[in-house]
Amino acid sequence: MSNLTRRNFGKLALATSVLALTGANSTKAAGRIRHFWWGNKERDKRTYATIDAFNAAFSDSTVVGETLGWRDYWPKMATQVAGKNMADVIQMDYRYIAEYARRGAIKSLNSHLDSRAIDMSDFAQFSFDGGTVDGQVYGVNIGTNSQFVPYDKTLLDQLGLTFDPYKWNWDEFVKISREVTKNTPDGIYGSVNNGGQEVWLDIWLRQKNKALYHENGDLAFDQKDIEEYWSFWVDCQETGVSWPATEEAASTSMAKSGIPTKKTAFDSYWTNQIVAIQKLTDHQIEMATIPHNPGDSPGMYYKCGQFISMSRDTQDESLSAKYMNFFIRDPRAVGILKLERGVPGTKEMRDFLKPGYSREEAIMVEYLEGIEGRTKKLPPVPPKGAGEIDRAFERYWEGVAFGKTKIASAAKSFYREAERIRRKQG
């Protein structure tokens, strides 16, 4: 935004009017707060730039950023909760928001919403639904999101392989993936392996009109569902549809995943991550739904990509609320963050960004609009202990993937542990 082109001049004019409406420059806030999020190279760069913009706008206030990857973020968060030194503002996921709210680790935002210190007055209802626990709002939607399959169009074009990215089924996924593995050099495979991805299990179940959890938090699947799901992915691994367990274990970050390393034609991510994925490869990456059987719903849903929440340990609620509002409404922030975390919750900010969409941002919005009539209701807020169950699911799958445990035995042990976790958590 440093070059004052005709387009940018128009943006600047809109930004000025928005700032006048929101009063973003009307007062200064004093103090120092910390913002902690999970991220990747692209997200970290944008978030630090947003922090810099806030600190420049409010020179007597200081926001300090802290970031880790997804796998390290939650153990670190647990340590901070135990040590009572949580960052003031934290990034929160739908999976964990109920657990953190009911433990008292994050604060209700209702008073800040009522005063419009955090202004969600024009957000869609699902943004409130996703961030609400027991009648109180604990998370602000910072990007509308859904699941998708990134595919390497450059590679598929080279091989002469085509499919309908909105209507393909599991048989086509298997067939195309196997063709990729068969017709490329050793070390290149059709797909990553999602046997340990609970998000994909969730979609798999929803396609069969089942679910991970009931409204009351009880398990909504059974042992046979797990056996069926893992059997599919073991078969994929053994028949050249997906890469082997060693590759999956080494895929510890986005940069090491299938498409960024050019080792697979298909991958699995959330829609907002298309921006970061494309930056990691010179191949053209496009977007497809998760495969589904003819006549079935894809099972996907619109989700608040992430929330921004206020921690129990904040030392300055006023400044934390001011920074959170800046993050979602101020053009200086939104113009930096763009769609990396998902599509903004306000039409005002979406309209502000639209003229400057990159190719990846444009196809993300197109994809989200394209699945609108084919999504299902947002699943219930995961119950307390859901994160522990997710980690157990991944752990047992690893035993299966590496051939250390039989599918039936691992599924039985996982299901028993999941039930035990739910009983313990209540």
Image: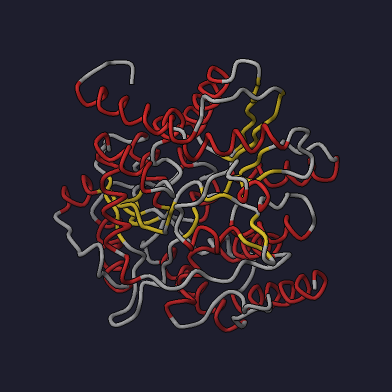
Q: In this rendering, is residue 240 above or below 360?
A: below
**Quadrant including the N terminus:** top left
Of the pair 161 and 166, the residue shown nearer to us: 166
Q: Where is residue 291 in the image (x, y as percent from the top left)?
A: 34, 68
**Quadrant including the C terminus:** bottom right
Q: Where is residue 215 in the image (x, y as percent from the top left)?
A: 63, 78
Residue at x-position 60% and y-position 15%: 59
Of the pair 160 and 84, the residue shown nearer to us: 84
Residue at x-position 61% and y-position 38%: 37
Of the pair 1 and 93, the residue shown nearer to us: 1
**In which quadrant of the rendered view does residue 191 lie?**
bottom left
Q: In this rendering, is residue 192 above or below 393?
A: above
Q: In this view, does 116 lie to the left or right of 148?
A: right
Judged from this view, the residue extending furthest toward the right is 83
Q: Is residue 119 left or right of residue 83?
A: left
Query: Can residue 196 be seen in this snapshot?
Result: no
Q: Where is residue 167 in the image (x, y as percent from the top left)?
A: 25, 70
Residue at x-position 48% and y-position 35%: 22
Residue at x-position 58% and y-position 60%: 402
